């Protein structure tokens, strides 16, 4: 059921786009492990120091040749994962050479399913977006503008259709604490009583706030990643997270040393519960069994 924050912030049902030539890459490995990655890519801008926020600021408005090279590097990285959350991607405007960066990364990483959430539409000048790339076809997908000033959103995905379904929320939260608290309260309502939850994205705050004083504090979530992610050239703050419900077994966590954006990507590998793994098997494996 779709939920509403207000009459002007109505959630809407979404549908994952399909790469038909990548469907042979759908489903999970037989070991039942799910490889997750969250990455704020800063629309493909390479930032290697605070000075670049000034000297490379024009790249937020105009195209440049290095962006395609950076996207290629990111796409090569993403190919090793099953579910990817992207923040600060462009949906196809002047600055990205009218390339939908979510779609391009889906092709580069050979993902069969992808979705772009447009959060701030500046026409031909910028298409500020979040994105999801997946090897699993979601049973449900909802697009949620978050409360507060426009430009922040969350994507809700449900994999499976039993009480063991996996709920994933991809987000990019506000910088300000008050607005962020309202956004987390909204996300807490979306999650409800779901048993298996993954929250992914640039949350613009530390895990201590998220787990101990935010509206998420009653969920018993785990924050396995404590290594700093920002700024990428000298990480000092842990702003990017993949939070897990306690019923999901953690296998591996890593902050990847890929200083392309001003954030570093976060990777987590989890083992799915047996019932959920069975649901997530690709159709060709089910038929073969």
Image (cartoon, grey):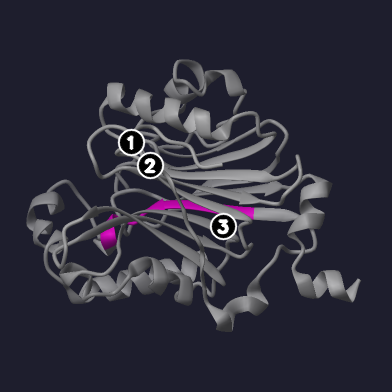
Closer to us: mark 1 or mark 3? 1
Q: Quadrant of the C terminus?
A: bottom right
Using a 10 Å C-alpha cutoff, classify the residue at mark 2 as few (fewer than 14 neighbours), some (14 to 19) or many (20 or more).
some
Numbered circle sitting on residue 7: 1
The image quarter containing residue 124 is bottom left
At x 35% / y 33%, what residue is drawn? 237
Q: Please tell me whether residue 112 is drawn above or below residue 244 in the rendered image.
A: below
Percent position of residue 171, x then y: 42, 43
38 within the magenta span: yes
Secondary structure under tag 1 reads loop
Marks 1/2: CA–CA distance: 6 Å
The residue lying toward the viewer, choosing from 44 and 61, is: 61
The image quarter containing residue 136 is bottom right
The residue at the far top in this view is 213
The residue lying toward the viewer, choosing from 263 and 153, is: 153
Q: Please tell me whether residue 117 is drawn above or below residue 241 in the rendered image.
A: below
**Is label 1 in contact with label 2 (beta carbons under 8 Å)?**
yes
Percent position of residue 17, x then y: 49, 69
The residue beneath circle 3 is: 83
- From the viewer's perspective, tell me whether residue 68 is left or right of residue 257: left
Give the mark nearer the N terminus: 1 vs 3: 1
Q: Please tell me whether residue 244 is drawn above or below residue 279 in the rendered image.
A: above
Numbered circle sitting on residue 10: 2
Closer to us: mark 3 or mark 2? 2
228 within the magenta span: no
Q: Which residues are magenta?
A: 35-43
At x 51% / y 42%, what residue is drawn? 2
Secondary structure under tag 2 reads loop
């Amino acid at each position: 059921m779709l939920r509403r924050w207000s009459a002007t912030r109505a959630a809407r049902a979404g549908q994952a786009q399909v790469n038909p030539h990548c469907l042979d890459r759908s489903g999970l490995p037989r070991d039942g492990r799910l490889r997750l990655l969250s990455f704020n890519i800063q629309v493909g801008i390479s930032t290697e120091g605070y000075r670049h926020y000034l000297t490379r600021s024009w790249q937020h408005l105009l195209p440049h040749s290095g962006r395609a090279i950076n996207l290629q590097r990111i796409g090569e990285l993403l190919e090793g994962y099953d579910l990817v959350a992207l923040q600060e991607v462009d949906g196809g405007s002047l600055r990205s050479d009218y390339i939908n960066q979510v779609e391009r990364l889906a092709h580069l990483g050979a993902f069969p399913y992808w979705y772009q959430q447009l959060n701030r539409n500046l026409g031909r000048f910028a298409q500020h977006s979040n994105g999801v790339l997946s090897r699993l076809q979601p049973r449900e997908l909802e697009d949620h503008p978050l409360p507060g000033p426009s430009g922040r959103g969350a994507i809700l995905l449900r994999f499976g259709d039993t009480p063991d379904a996996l709920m994933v929320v991809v987000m990019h939260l506000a910088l300000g604490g008050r607005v962020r608290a309202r956004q987390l309260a909204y996300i807490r309502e979306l999650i409800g009583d779901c048993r298996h939850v993954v929250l992914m994205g640039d949350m613009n705050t530390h895990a201590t706030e998220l787990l101990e004083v935010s509206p998420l504090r009653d969920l018993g979530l785990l924050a396995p990643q404590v290594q700093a992610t920002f700024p990428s050239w000298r990480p000092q703050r842990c702003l990017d997270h993949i939070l897990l419900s306690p019923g999901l077994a953690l296998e591996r966590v890593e902050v990847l040393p890929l200083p392309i954006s001003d954030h570093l990507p976060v990777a987590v590998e989890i083992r799915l519960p047996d019932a959920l793994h069975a649901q997530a098997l690709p159709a060709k494996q089910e038929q073969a069994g």
